[in-house]
Image (cartoon, rainbow, N blue to C red):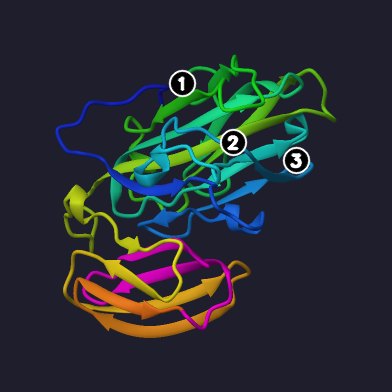
Amino acid sequence: MFSTGTKSNAQTQVLIDYWSFDDVDSTSAMLVPNTSIVGGAGLAYLGAYYDSVQPGTVLNAVGTYTVLNSGSAALRLRNPAEGAFTLTLPTTGYKDITLKYAEQRTKSGSQENIVTYTVDGTTWINTAISAVATYVIDSVDTGSNGWQLETFSFSSDANVNNNPHFAVQINFAIGDSGTSGNDRFDNITLYGISDTSHTGISSISPSESSYTLYPNPVMNNLEINGYSEGDKAIVITDIVGQTIYRGIKSGKQFTINTSQLIAGNYFISIKESDSGRLTTMKFVKQ
């Protein structure tokens, strides 16, 4: 039902969700993607605990994160043999889904991962024939080297398409020790093709798939560039989910004054009045 490879499509895939794990000042900020077209994406770890580690990698990085800098970081899952890592990845409005991420482990980290997924939010699909991908983490390094790319295509399972309950779970196995070591993840991406057959979803081109924020980090005025002219409901929240700002903006380009915000990480959600499309992105206030 899914394979560890990519499918060649005449249509260009759109970036739905992206986590870079760079420039974060708290572990809770790492749970929400830097950008999300559909919304509702998140991470959860059932092991001992997680934190940030430097440096990360440029493998599978997108946009400005393709340059490794002093702020580059990765998600570090401690004692991975003790728990599973879950990615909640709604695909509403998209089909032919592909998940990619970079991974490495320390010497005592989990050596083997078993990947399952759900289409109903409850039952994890796990059959030895087609629906489970087991792979070995060959790369062992504690620095910027030793990363390997993992790619999973779900295009053969139509139930993954347009699915608000889609999620992927990574189960850890064959570790040298269940109480030490760690596995690291960076640049998690989810791609898909806009599905015009889905009710209420209109076709968009790759260049229309997201908004851009500038500058980021920001001191005063945050410039937002999009692709639609209509009204947009804007909500800014802090890393614990408290609403900081609500407003209505119009046009493809608009500005939000952030001078009154304290320094830290924030999330801006943009909901288009015409299409109902929701985009959530992270920005840093200096």
Residue sitting nearer the eye, 51 or 42: 51
Q: Would you name the residue on which mark 3 appears?
A: 47
Q: Eyeballing the image, is 219 above or below 281?
A: below
Give the residue number, with chain letter if any, for mark 2.
Answer: 55
Q: Which type of secondary structure does the marked residue at label 3 adopt?
A: loop
Residue 165 relative to residue 242: left or right: left
Mark 2 element type: loop
Residue found at x 37% / y 58%: 38
Q: Residue at horizontal 22%, vertical 72%?
A: 253
Packing grade of label 3 (10 A; few <14, some 14-19, many >=20) is some
Q: CA distance from mark 2 to mark 1?
A: 35 Å
Q: Which residues are magenta?
A: 259-286
User: Local crowd at mark 2 within 10 Å, few (<14), some, or many (≥20)?
Assistant: some
Type of residue at label 2? Pro
In reply to whether residue 139 is colored magenta, the answer given is no
Q: Is residue 30 above or below residue 13?
A: below
